[in-house]
């Protein structure tokens, strides 16, 4: 910024494009008072703060890497043939009696799922036999499910995410359920919202339910034109009623917000 | 900001305290161009970035909470008497033959320590007997060590941190070692630096070694006056020589930096 002092000590700034301009400490571009953001002190504080958050992230990532249990399914860990002290196998019942068993550790299943805990600690059939049969699931989904319990990681596509929501709900693995719901919410669109709403309803997936309902309500004028609308009215009318109820409730609330004399 | 145009179109700013002043978007205080930090765009970007980092931290914390294995030592988890499917016990050999055993899972020990992995997977005495004797360690330190393998958490004081560095080095648990070293570095002072330097040397604790050496070299004029100096010259003179060598090397490097014609 070019400045000059005039005779009575008042600072004159040249009135061309860079009058009042300063250089941003972050992007190094010039800007003027109209586009000013923060003072230097706050900028420095924010930079330190950012560094600290980044250090915290590094520490947490190292902790996750340490706590990740190498999975008995993880062939890249050591020799494939190494004993891994597994004491239980899970079998996808859909595979029939000769389904490939997925090996695991009782202690880990118990630690991650209250349902496995109840099953294995209470001397039920599964605990005695060392075999847990899981119905309505493919081998691939079961394998991905068990792998998540060890590593908190899953390679998702939509099909797998739906399957894992079902398993996570059944075995009460909240962290996995939230992970899959987040993924499915990111894939939500007008074409799949009613199907997702019904799925979320059935499997108690609150995050998905809210997102799907919100999308439907925001486009209520097109609701009855949805391809599956008639099918749902026929098959599951209570679900459709709930959408209308939520829409009505939102309308009343909005009206009450605009005019406080209207009671919601 | 008060501005006025003079006759030839040049903007004059009043030269009193708030000339050129703007309001910081972060602290809401007024500041002038001299104390300017960032432009508005960078401020907004930084705020979004900060929010994103905070979300990442929340996600990672949830992941850590999920992956934390409830420890067989953790009495607060469920009933104390619940079976936890442990298949090995560790005993602090210092406690004598009747030492209290610390129960654990082979699979977890193998997952966290390459030394336990070699020991348990290779049908050594410990694997067959299901008992691992650990020498030169108290029951409390052994318990804290095993607990850390399950939870990545330890309640440290200096004594415990030293004990855990020794165990972490012996069983190659890098994450625990780094955690304890960080704690001990935070407790480093002039009175304990030589002792810490020797300890770090003995147990291959690089982080501590660098911090202690750096503190000594920065106060080299007082080095020979350290209480334990004579004792170390007597007991472990090579260690003292290494300090002198590091000091000399730093001096030569500093000289070379000041005068590039001096070769380090």
Image (spheres, coloured by chain):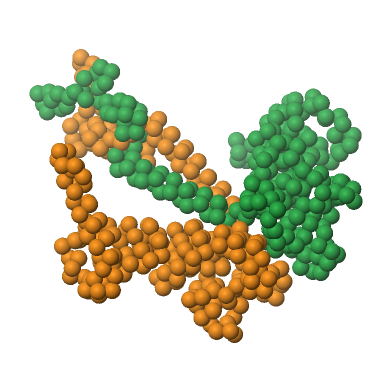
Chain colours: A orange, B green
Of residues A40 and B102, the one nearer the viewer is B102
Q: In the image, B63: left or right of A21?
A: right
User: From what the image shows, is residue B78 above or below residue A182?
Assistant: above
Of residues B80 and B148, the one nearer the viewer is B80
User: In the figure, residue B120 lies in which quadrant?
Assistant: bottom right
Of residues B67 and A246, the one nearer the viewer is A246
Using the rendered image of the protein, determine whether residue B91 is visible from the camera's viewpoint.
Answer: yes
At 59% from the left edge and 80% from the top edge, which residue is drawn? A100
Q: Position of residue B54 (x, y in %)?
A: 44, 46
Q: In the image, B58: left or right of A264?
A: right
Of residues A177 and B228, the one nearer the viewer is A177
Q: Quadrant of the C terminus of chain A?
A: top left
Q: Position of residue B238 (x, y in %)?
A: 84, 41
At 20% from the left edge and 65% from the top edge, which residue is drawn? A223
Q: Position of residue B106 (x, y in %)?
A: 73, 62
For the image, the number of numbered tags is 0
Using the rendered image of the protein, determine whether residue A187 is visible from the camera's viewpoint.
Answer: no
At 41% from the left edge and 44% from the top edge, which residue is drawn? B50
Q: Quadrant of the N terminus of chain A?
A: top left
Q: Position of residue A5 (x, y in %)?
A: 24, 21
At 58% from the left edge and 64% from the top edge, which residue is drawn? A116
User: From what the image shows, is residue A185 above or below residue B39?
Assistant: below
Q: In the image, A88: left or right of B43?
A: right
As drawn, the residue found furthest toward the left would be B7
């Amino acid at each position: 910024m070019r400045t000059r002092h005039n005779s009575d000590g008042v600072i004159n700034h040249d009135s061309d494009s860079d009058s009042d301009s300063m250089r941003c400490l972050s992007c190094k571009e010039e800007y003027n008072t109209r586009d000013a953001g923060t003072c230097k002190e706050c900028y420095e504080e924010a930079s330190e703060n950012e560094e600290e958050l980044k250090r915290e992230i590094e520490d947490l990532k190292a902790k996750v890497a340490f706590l990740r249990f190498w999975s008995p399914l993880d062939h890249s860990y050591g020799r494939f043939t190494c004993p891994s002290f597994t004491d239980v196998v899970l079998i996808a019942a859909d595979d029939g009696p000769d389904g490939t068993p997925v090996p695991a550790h009782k202690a880990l299943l118990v630690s991650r799922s209250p349902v496995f805990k109840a099953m294995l600690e209470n001397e039920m059939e599964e605990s005695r036999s060392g075999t847990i049969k899981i119905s309505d699931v493919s081998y691939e989904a079961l394998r991905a499910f068990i792998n998540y319990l060890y590593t908190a990681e899953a390679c998702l596509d939509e099909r797998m995410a739906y399957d894992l929501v079902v398993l996570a709900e059944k075995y009460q693995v909240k962290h996995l359920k939230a992970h899959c719901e987040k993924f499915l919410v990111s894939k939500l669109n007008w074409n799949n919202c009613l199907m997702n709403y019904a799925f979320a309803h059935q499997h108690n997936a609150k995050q998905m339910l809210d997102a799907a309902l919100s999308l439907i309500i925001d486009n209520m004028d097109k609701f009855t034109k949805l391809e599956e609308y008639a099918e749902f009215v026929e098959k599951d009318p209570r679900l459709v009623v709930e959408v209308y109820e939520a829409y009505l409730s939102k309308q009343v609330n909005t009206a009450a917000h605009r005019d406080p004399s209207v009671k919601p």
